[in-house]
Each structure stands twice: as C-alpha cells, then as structure tokens.
Image: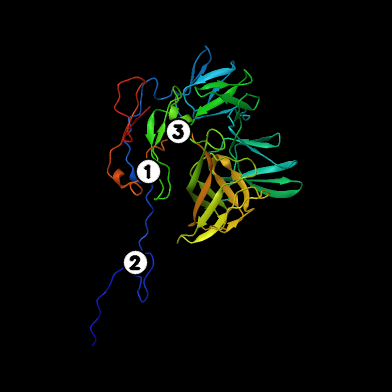
Amino acid sequence: MSTPGIPHFHYTRTIPPRSVGIAQVVATPATPEDLVDIDNLVLTTARGPGALTVAPYPTGAVVNAYSLNNSVEVSGFLTYLLENQFFEITYLSDASGNPLYYQHPFELLNVNNVAVFDLDGNAVTGFLVQDNTLFHSFDGSPYWVRYYADGILRTDLLCYQPAMARTTAPTATSYSLTAGGLLALSSTGSYWLRFTATNAWQLLPPYNVPSNDPWYPRVRFNLRPVPLEWSRQPFTPCTPYLMASWVPGKVLASNLVEFERHPTYFDGVNYPDILVYDKNWNLKYALDGSDSAANIDKGYLFPWMRSQFINIDAAHARCQVAVALASDDQPFAFYNYVEKDVVFRDLDINPFTRPQMKDTLIQFYYAERGADVPPRTPENIYE
C-alpha cells in the first residue's frame, strides 16, 4: 500500500495543473466607500445646510418645501433665490395637478398608441403625451417606451431629460441659475419645484474606481459662498462637466447598461466609451462611443467596435447597446459627467497608491475667510 503524498493547498484564481478544486470563494470587491470612514460634522449654521426654500427676489413670501422630493408651486415673480442647488423644476402638470419634471422627445412624427413598460414587461401609467413628447415624473428606474410611428411598432429607452433645461437666458421651457442661487424664469406663471438632495457642508466618500486609481475626497457645499476649489476643477468640455475614467457599471438587461456617475454629457452623437469584461475578467467588448462619421483613431490597445449604441438616457448614464450582455458582465465607461461637488484632487487617500494613508486621520476644516485656522497642509484642508 502506497503512502499518500503531502497535500498542497493553493488559494489562487487559476488552479495549477493536476490539482482539484475543492472550494470556491466569491466576494464583492470593496469600494472606496466601504473602506473609508467619514465622521461628518454637517454644518447646521445659516451658511451650512441650505434651506429647502424658494424666496421671491428681492422680496416676497418665502415658500418652504420642508422635505426633499416634496413639490411646491411658485408663481407671480420672474426671479427667486434658492439656498440649494440640487433641485428640479417644471412648468407642466397633468390633469390631476401632478408636476411632470421629465420629458422623452420622440424623434419621429405621427407617434400614436404610446405605452410605457418596466424591464419585466409590466405596463405603467402616469405620463402625458403632447407636442410629440412624452412627459413624466417616474422614479428614476429604467423603462421602455413602445409606440407606433409611420405604422411601425418601435421601442425606445425612456429618457429622463429635464422638462426645463438650464440655459444662460430663460425661455418658456428653460431657466437660468447664477452661482449664488438666483433662479430666473421667463414668466410669472405657475412653476413646480422640488429639492432632491441636501447641500449642507459635508464630506462625501470618493467615487468608486479601480483599486489602483487615486481616491479623491469630495466636499459638498452651500451656494453662498461657493468655494473657490469648485471653479478651479478641470471642467471639460464645459462647466460643470468633468472627465471620468474607468467608471464601474452594472448590466440591467441583455442590451442595457448603467454607470455610476451621472448625468452624462451627450451632444447627440458622442456616447461613452465602454469596456465590457466577463466575470473572469476576459475582455468581451470595446465599444467606441465617438461619432461614427468622425475620423477618430483610438489605437490598437483595445479592439474597438463602432456604431454599437442604440440609445442613451443621459440623466442616469444608461446606454442601450447592440451587443449581448450577461448579467455578471463587468462594464466600465469613460465619459464626461456633471459634478456639483468639489472633487479634492490635491489629496489621494487610496492606501494602495499612497501607503501612508492607511489608518490615517485626515481633517477638513470649514472656516470663515480671515479666521484663525490651522496651517493648510494635505492633511488639514479648509475653505
């Protein structure tokens, strides 16, 4: 009888030759938010929280929304002063008086028999179709819009395009907003407005990025004063868009993928560039989002495929693509997105790229200009 050999146990992604797998360990990769502890002292002073109010300017009765996502109606003035930059506004409501904050314009004419379905195929209600546009206030989830145009049944990814766009000069379907929160409208008629997030001075966790990329803390601020650091960020192609690389995403359906940072910059022809890996980190697709009519050479590092995008919901960084996706695929994207906070690029707190950051306490200070504050160093940050 032969003596059994000494067993060897390997903990590895790839099983060595002549070995037998006895167990598989699966864990969700930790994100910067998981590994960074934030002890926030959210400022509650008059200059800190950003009240959920709409104040006619220069004088008038203040309207208080009291809570997030609570719609209030305002009218009678052309300008209003806001304390919070995180808001949505619309000029349109349905027959029941419910505000409709988003629109889905149809590219084709003669649209009829419009219906909206969730990803499971269930029909949903609560929208209005007029002027060849679908108006709605859905909850941000992905939906499909099915309709007939020129006698052909078509399906679109529902867009959450704002019913009123932000511009430099207000019109019937747009508004302007100064850095200090002065909202200008084109009419004294009725508008509906709701706040979607608090803007008290506070720290936010770094965005989710690959482990070997820098982790930059984020600082949320009130409108008055807007910190100088915000305007100094490298906006591209215009304010308030920043370039984001290796943004993680998730597969929502076999041809639908969503990414974490939004809204995206979309000019009608250029989509995000997307790399899709399978669950074992084998590259499946490299989708070139640039204008298919443009002469752009992205080199040979990835096998780029062009003209693979069907639609996009820029508000949620959702892309409908022409390739088949598996539920466990791992997508990453490269695109410009709206940044309303300060991404503090002077400080990388990733302990993988900066080992000295491990188990380190980093303090951020808010101080009135001219006040007695600690020295400004990479570990002591203040306005």
- Measured as percent of width and height from the top left, residue 108 is found at 72, 42
Query: Image point 35% across, 65% down: which residue?
Result: 12
- Amino acid, disc 3: Asp
- The mark tally for this picture is 3
Closer to us: mark 3 or mark 1? 3
Most foreground residue, 109 or 347: 347
Between the C-alphas of marks 1 and 2, the distance is: 29 Å
Question: Would you identify the image quadrant in which residue 323 lies?
Answer: bottom right
Between the C-alphas of marks 3 and 1, the distance is: 16 Å
Query: Image point 60% across, 17% down: which residue?
Result: 78
Mark 3: few/some/many CA within 10 Å (<14, 14-19, 20+):
some
Q: Sequence-wise, which precedes: disc 1 or disc 2?
A: 2
Mark 2: few/some/many CA within 10 Å (<14, 14-19, 20+):
few
- Residue tagged by mark 2? 23
- Residue tagged by mark 1? 33
- Measured as percent of width and height from the top left, residue 374 is found at 29, 27
- Residue tagged by mark 3? 341
Query: Image point 64% across, 42% down: which residue?
Result: 268
Q: Is residue 323 visible?
A: no
SS at circle 3 = loop
Where does the C terminus fall, quadrant-wise?
top left
In the image, which disc is placed on residue 98? none
Mark 1: few/some/many CA within 10 Å (<14, 14-19, 20+):
some
- Amino acid, disc 1: Glu
Closer to us: mark 1 or mark 2? 1
- Measured as percent of width and height from the top left, residue 61 is found at 51, 13
Where does the N terminus fall, quadrant-wise?
bottom left
